[in-house]
Image (tube, coloured by chain):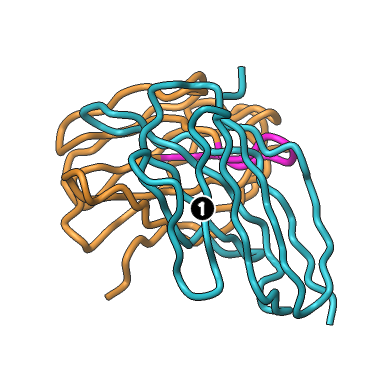
Chain colours: A orange, B cyan
Amino acid sequence: NAGVTQTPKFRVLKTGQSMTLLCAQDMNHEYMYWYRQDPGMGLRLIHYSVGEGTTAKGEVPDGYNVSRLKKQNFLLGLESAAPSQTSVYFCASRGRGRGANVLTFGAGSRLTVL
Amino acid sequence: DQQVKQNSPSLSVQEGRISILNCDYTNSMFDYFLWYKKYPAEGPTFLISISSIKDKNEDGRFTVFLNKSAKHLSLHIVPSQPGDSAVYFCAASELGGYQKVTFGIGTKLQVIP
């Protein structure tokens, strides 16, 4: 049981380049999230999805786009990378229901924008 | 505006002693609180949680206390072990269709052998 898998684990981009981070979960979870972690800022929600085909903005959505075409996958895209997007990105998922408050995280994707 | 605050960025404790990590929140709609533990180069992992209808939850060496009137919760680790050295995130969620989870900035715990 792999849980939540993120690819790639590391990436270096030049300013203006584009890329996509892929998150895949095998737990049949309804909800999926993208967070970024920065020193002194904790984990901040970028975008989230409550189900296949639906996405919504979190607290720091600017400069990012997402898609949830399949229930198990949640893609995070950067159309024109900026140095301010240098960060560690975490994908997470959780099931539906009152007792399913626990997020399962991936191992993270470290992105550096030069 | 930070809705979940962890005011101590770091904490050092001797092995065998108690570690107390604190967390304050401002959103009265939060009804479920969680602690996550994170090792370097890994994703956060769930540690323990508490519902707003309780004031204490215990799991082995870990106990979480909730004081709703003060909007404060704390995580106690007794006894502390070197393997507990990690960053601990306090998190909270509110009633809602998607139950967005809001995280604090984390407290780095170092347990000294």
* Neighbour tally class for label 1: few under 14, some 14-19, many 20 plus, Cα within 10 Å: many
Q: Nearer the viewer, residue A65 or B62?
A: B62
Q: Is residue B36 a member of the stretch shown in magenta?
A: no
Instruction: Please determine whether, in this image, residue B47 is positioned above or below residue B94.
Output: below
Q: Chain of mark 1?
A: B
> Percent x, y for residue A26?
22, 63
Q: Is residue A72 left or right of residue A43?
A: left
| Front residue (pair A87, B71) | B71
Residue at (76% x, 73% y) in the render: B17
Residue at which label 1 appears:
B35
Main secondary structure found in the magenta portion: strand
User: Where does the magenta region start and end?
Assistant: A34-43
Going 21% across and 34% down the picture, which residue do you hit?
A50
The quadrant of the rendering that contains the N terminus of chain B is top right
* Displayed quadrant of residue B61: bottom right
Q: Choose top left, top right, bottom left or bottom right for residue A17.
A: top right
Tell me the SS state at disc 1. strand
Q: Amino acid at mark 1?
A: Trp
User: Quick check: A79 above or below A35?
Assistant: above
Q: Which residue is found at the position 65% from the left and 39% from the top?
A: B105
Q: Nearer the viewer, residue A44 or B15?
A: B15
Percent position of residue B77, x then y: 63, 67
Q: How many marks?
A: 1
Return the x and y of residue B103 as percentages of the image width and height: 53, 38
On screen, residue A50 versus residue B61, left or right, reads: left
- Which of the pair A64/B43 is nearer the observer? B43
As drawn, A7 above or below B103: below
Q: Residue furthest bottom?
A: B113
